[in-house]
Image (cartoon, rainbow, N blue to C red):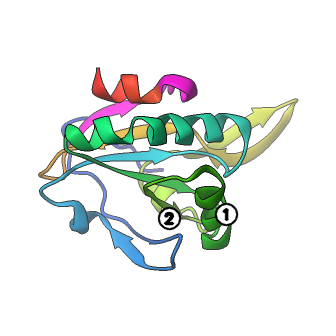
Amino acid sequence: MATVELNQKAPDFEAKNQQGEIVNLAQYKGKKLVLYFYPKDDTPGCTKEACNLRDNYTDLKKQGYEVLGVSPDNEAKHQKFIGKYDLPFDLLADPEHTVSEAYGVWVEKNMYGRTYMGIKRTTFIINEEGIVEEIIKKVKTDDHTKQILK
């Protein structure tokens, strides 16, 4: 499995957003990017995280950040999630886990004694040159923006 380290070039990716448009890392060259991975649309923690980023989106933009969310959900689920919570940023569909695996966040998880594969909630801050500037592994879903802008 891939491991992404601080001060390394961020792995390139290509995935479809909620509109079915191809999005890749190269499109964000010259911009700071908040690339956040989350398990599933419209679940309590993921909704808190998305809404926290939405509520502070203006502050993130003022600081020069673009925001992209990534989960295994498909484009249609992303459209519903964005519509329901009025999210101002794109969500990438990663049903084959290629982006998640490239960033090392598709991992074995354990709940109630059952093991399964899923996304470890993680955020990568990528600078204008495409270098990983920060990795937030212990995401506070209801106060995530503060972790990013600290």
Which residue in the protein does label 2 denote?
Answer: 98
Describe the element under mark 2 as helix, strand or loop. Answer: helix
Q: Nearer the viewer, residue 132 or 84?
A: 84
Q: Which residues are magenta?
A: 133-143
Label 1: state its secondary structure: helix
Number of marks present in the image shown: 2
Q: Earlier in the sequence, mark 2 or mark 1?
A: 1
Q: Is residue 90 magenta?
A: no
Q: Amino acid at mark 2?
A: Thr
Q: Nearer the viewer, mark 2 or mark 1?
A: 1
Q: Are marks 2 and 1 in contact (CB under 8 Å)?
A: no
Q: Residue at x 51, y 55 (%)?
A: 70
Front residue of this view, candidates 2 and 24: 24
Q: Quadrant of residue 125?
A: top left
Q: Which residue is mark 1?
A: 80
User: What whole-number distance in Å separates the C-alpha atoms at marks 2 and 1?
Assistant: 23 Å
User: Would you say 102 lies left or right of 113 here?
Assistant: left
Position of residue 54 measured from the top left corner of the image (x, y, whole percent):
47, 42
Q: Where in the figure is residue 117, as x and y percent of width and height?
A: 69, 49
In the displayed structure, 22 sits above or below 98; it is below
